[in-house]
Image (spheres, grey):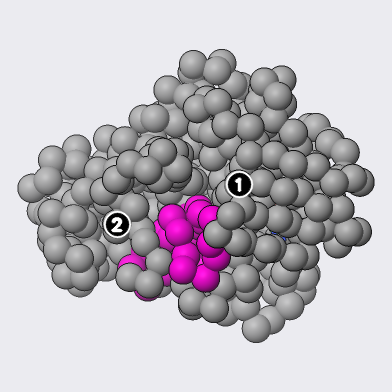
């Protein structure tokens, strides 16, 4: 599956940070983690911290899947608004999922601080702007329910949004918890630190067969090497959809571009993730090297992801929309890219066991909150492995 176009910003910015050998022999381990993106990096780190013996395998180089294409906005807001999620699963449970997002952002900040990882992690706020009057009515309803559950929100009138952010809107929810990060660098750093603690990593190691039995698991690579273990944790991103019979997500493409460095922008935008209520939506954030990153314009995946013309047209549309949101802003594009994206029926991830695979657990954080969901996967997976109950695992279960 094509996960992204070539010019993904983080890869260009950081280059190839670490390379690992491919697997050329048979080995055995305790836990096999499939996937060396941000999810595999976070989950294997949690497993190593609980003293499991872990082997991580990836068919690409580390971080070269969706992780190098992400715009890495860390938000607690799920793609499904809280008032709609409440209709699906009940208000209390929906609010719990939202609160878990806030905790995940705080937990990731602590992890990065504790391990002193230089990955551009910045605490931010998040501003969700209504693009017209009807959207503002719905958004105000959303504000009320978030406020009821004390999610740290304020309602900003159109005049205040304009005054504080230079943004044209019909009103907005300002949330106090959000962050941004360079997920590609974070992935590499976490994996590098855990290799020092004994984790085995093999890249360019494509797993073509999974034998998940009641007494253990075996994976076989395309070149015939095998790994025996007790459990598999699938952190294999959007490509996992082709492994499962259960239809867990719809896949499409999404687009992003970054400006040149040192863009002249309202100082409050530097500390705030912005997104709007349009469909397809527009979102923006600054980067730690002084650029503005904008994204959105999701479209179906029945076009070629590599159509240069399509990508260029999409970034022109994004820049035009940006001009309407922030009139007078001078945005000069440096790079643009596109990537595969997925959404689930309720905006929640799939984390836990699928009845289709014995002795395996999945961490599939699809949607706009992929990274915050992967952070939540850390305690879910370690709890499930330890035989403990986990409330979130109930909400994020397969066959729901
Ligand atoms: C343009 C864009 C913007 C985005 N913006 C955001 C955002 O703002 N916030 C957010 O939270 N999320 C965002 N996302 C989503 C986010 O990128 C993903 O949730 C996240 O990167 C998923 O990480 P992952 O590790 O699960 O998947 P990946 O990074 O794709 O890693 C999975 C790895 O598994 C490996 N693998 C798969 N199958 C096999 C196999 N059979 N054998 C061996 N290895 C295998 C792959 O090679 C891959 O490296 C965005 C995505 C895109 C494309």
Name which residue lies at 72% across and 69% down: 1
Q: Is 61 placed left or right of 322 in the picture? A: right
Majority SS type along the magenta span: loop
Task: Identify the residue shown where x is 61% and y is 22%.
Answer: 118
- Tell me the distance, in whole angstroms, between the alpha carbons under discs 2 and 1: 23 Å
**Mark 1 residue element:** loop
| Image-based side of 228 in relation to 233, left or right | right
Mark toward the start of the polypeptide (2 vs 1): 1
In front of the other: 45 or 74: 45
Q: Is residue 163 visible?
A: no
> Residue 394 has which mark?
2
Q: Quadrant of residue 379?
A: top left
Location of residue 318 with respect to 101 vertically, above or below: below
Quadrant of the frame with the C terminus? bottom left
Label 2 beta carbon within 8 A of ligand 1: no
For residue 230, which numbered disc appears in the image?
1
Residue 363 is covered by the magenta coloring: yes
Q: Quadrant of residue 256?
A: bottom right
Determine the residue positioned at 80% across, 42% down. 27
Mark 1: few/some/many CA within 10 Å (<14, 14-19, 20+): some
Q: Looking at the image, is 348 positioned above or below residue 36?
A: below
Quadrant observed for ligand 1 in the rendered image: bottom right
Residue that lies at the very extreme toward the front in this rendered image:
215
Q: Residue at x 21, y 57 (%)?
A: 94
x then y, percent, for residue 390: 30, 46
Q: Nearer the viewer, residue 97 or 67?
A: 97
Q: Which residue range is magenta in the image?
A: 342-368
């Amino acid at each position: 599956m094509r996960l992204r176009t070539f010019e993904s910003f983080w890869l260009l910015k950081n280059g190839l940070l670490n390379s690992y050998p491919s697997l050329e022999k048979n080995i055995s381990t305790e836990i096999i983690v499939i996937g060396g993106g941000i999810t595999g990096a976070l989950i294997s780190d949690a497993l190593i911290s609980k003293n499991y013996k872990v082997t991580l395998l990836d068919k690409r180089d580390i971080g070269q899947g969706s992780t190098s294409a992400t715009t890495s906005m860390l938000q607690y807001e799920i793609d499904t608004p809280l008032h709609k999620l409440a209709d699906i699963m009940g208000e209390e449970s929906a609010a719990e999922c939202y609160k878990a997002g806030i905790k995940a952002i705080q937990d990731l900040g602590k992890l990065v601080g504790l391990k002193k990882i230089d990955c551009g992690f910045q605490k931010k706020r998040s501003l969700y702007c209504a693009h017209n009057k009807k959207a503002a009515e719905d958004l105000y309803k959303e504000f009320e329910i978030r406020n009821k559950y004390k999610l740290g929100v304020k309602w900003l009138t159109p005049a205040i949004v304009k005054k504080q952010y230079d943004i044209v809107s019909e009103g907005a929810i300002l949330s106090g918890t959000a962050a941004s990060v360079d997920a590609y660098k974070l992935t590499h750093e976490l994996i590098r630190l855990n290799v020092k603690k004994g984790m085995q990593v093999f890249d360019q190691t494509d797993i073509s067969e999974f034998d998940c039995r009641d007494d253990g698991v075996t994976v076989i690579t395309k070149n015939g090497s095998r790994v025996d273990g007790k459990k598999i944790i699938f952190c294999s991103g959007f490509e996992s959809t082709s492994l499962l019979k259960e239809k867990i997500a719809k896949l499409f493409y999404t687009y992003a571009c970054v400006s040149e460095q040192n863009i002249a922008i309202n100082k409050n935008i530097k500390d705030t993730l912005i997104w709007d209520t349009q469909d397809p939506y527009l979102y923006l954030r600054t980067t730690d090297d002084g650029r503005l990153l904008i994204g959105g314009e999701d479209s179906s995946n029945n076009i070629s992801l590599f159509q240069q013309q399509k990508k260029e047209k999409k970034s022109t549309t994004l820049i035009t929309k940006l001009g309407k949101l922030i009139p007078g802003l001078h945005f000069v594009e440096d790079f643009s890219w596109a990537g595969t994206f997925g959404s689930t029926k309720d905006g929640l991830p799939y984390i836990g066991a699928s009845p289709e695979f014995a002795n395996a657990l999945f961490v599939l954080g699809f949607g706009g909150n992929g990274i915050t969901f992967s952070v939540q996967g850390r305690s879910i997976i370690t709890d499930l492995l330890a035989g403990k109950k986990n409330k979130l695992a109930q909400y994020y279960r397969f066959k729901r």
